[in-house]
Image (cartoon, rainbow, N blue to C red):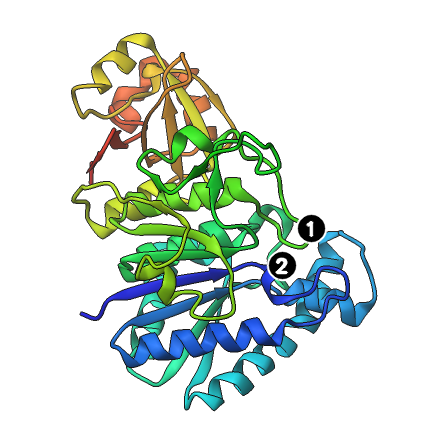
Amino acid sequence: MSKRIVVKVGSTLLANEETLRMRFAFMWGLLRDIADLQNQGYDVVLMSSGAVALGREILKTDDNSIATKQAASACGQPVLLHAYRSIAQEMSKDIAQVLVTMSEMESQDHFDDISNTIERLFEYPVIPIVNENDTTATKDLRVGDNDRLAAKVAEMIGAEHLVILTSIDGLYDRNPSDPDAQFIDVLDDVSQYIDGTEETNGLGSGGMKTKLQAANMAQQCNCTTHIAEGIIDAPVSSVINNTRVHTKCLPIDQTASRQELWVSNRLRVACSIIVTKQVAQSLADTKQNIVYNDIASRFGAFSRDDILHVFSEDGVELARGYAECSSDDLEHLQHMRNQFDSEYGADAVSYTHLRAHETVLDL
């Protein structure tokens, strides 16, 4: 199998923040580098933002409502793709557009369909360009940032590298404007920095926090994440070859099946449940089903086969897994304890047990 790379490019690199016009020089350098990598035997997927920003320039609006963003995406997407195609053809390549939605990425069958499409595209001289379908995604059913979506694509294709190109050279231990800020070139534990990085940029929907969330997801897939500044000359290969300064988030050395990764790296979780202290203690060492009377409380509604997060009363995540009943069923069961075993069986929820660097799936 060829080495595989997912490249995510933010809106600020593709569109001038003031004029909202395309940065053709950057786009040319990016596609030139991707074409060269493909010619060297790499499979490369480009996760490109920019459609909404470019569409705003067409609509002459700064309205941030969901409907206007959808309209802007509808206007900007063909402009963005036309520019990519025109540039790619100069490198004897073409492009393929793959639009996805949250529901498709969260459905195992659709996830596999998208994966099969990208796998087939790798057989041809094209550059697959993936983006969320902003024109159909609603507020409650959209990923909202291409960083985490890029991590899901990296998981999908078994990528070795996730390269996130942005407007700064990487991660700092505090706001880069602080004169005492220290640059972080290599990072083992991404989670320790996630909560302290809330800022977003002017055009994009994500900031450093979503990039670290993406890196955290990629770590579990044995994928190295590179957070780097988007330069014109060799923006991707210079990072892969480690010839310029950037932040490298190292993968976790673990073995997990594709199904296990799909469960653990969900983009959306339907509900969280909190288990009793006794159950929380036993989950640290033993994989077991969770029955209705193990649950101390829950947050949110869920349906059968939704993915749930399981927490201790101290707020520590213990597990993730499939619900074997709906929240309505669970509420009903809690009022009918005496009839539960005879009518429904002993199990209300089965789960995926997650330890620090290990995932065990209870099928």
| 52 relative position to 315: left or right | right
State how far apart marks 1 and 2 are (Cα): 8 Å
Q: Secondary structure at mark 2?
A: helix
In this rendering, position of residue 352 left or right of residue 300:
left
- Judge by depth and name the residue closer to the eye, 204 or 264: 204
Q: Nearer the viewer, residue 55 or 182?
A: 182
User: Mark 1 falls on what kind of element?
Assistant: loop
Q: Residue furthest front?
A: 179
Residue 75 image position (x, y, % from top left): 70, 73
The quarter of the image holding the N terminus is: bottom left
Spot occupied by residue 353 in the image (x, y as percentages of width and height): 24, 30
Question: Looking at the image, do the residues carrying marks 1 and 2 touch, with CB atoms under 8 Å apart?
Answer: yes
Q: Quadrant of residue 3?
A: bottom left
Callout 2, which amino acid?
Thr
**Which residue, given by chain and number where applicable, does mark 1 sit on?**
202
Looking at the image, residue 318 sits to the left or right of residue 181; the answer is left
Picture residue at 62% right of the left edge, 59% below the top: 12
Kindly tell me whether residue 102 is visible in this rendering: no
Looking at the picture, which amino acid does disc 1 mark?
Gly
In the drawing, does residue 289 fall left or right of residue 218? left
Q: Is residue 27 visible?
A: yes
Q: Is residue 245 above or below residue 328?
A: below
Snapshot quadrant of residue 217: top left
Q: Position of residue 346 (x, y in %)?
A: 24, 23
How many residues crowd around disc 2 within 10 Å: few (fewer than 14), some, or many (20 or more)? many
The image quarter containing residue 363 is top left
Residue 12 tag number: 2
Residue located 22% across and 33% down the image: 357
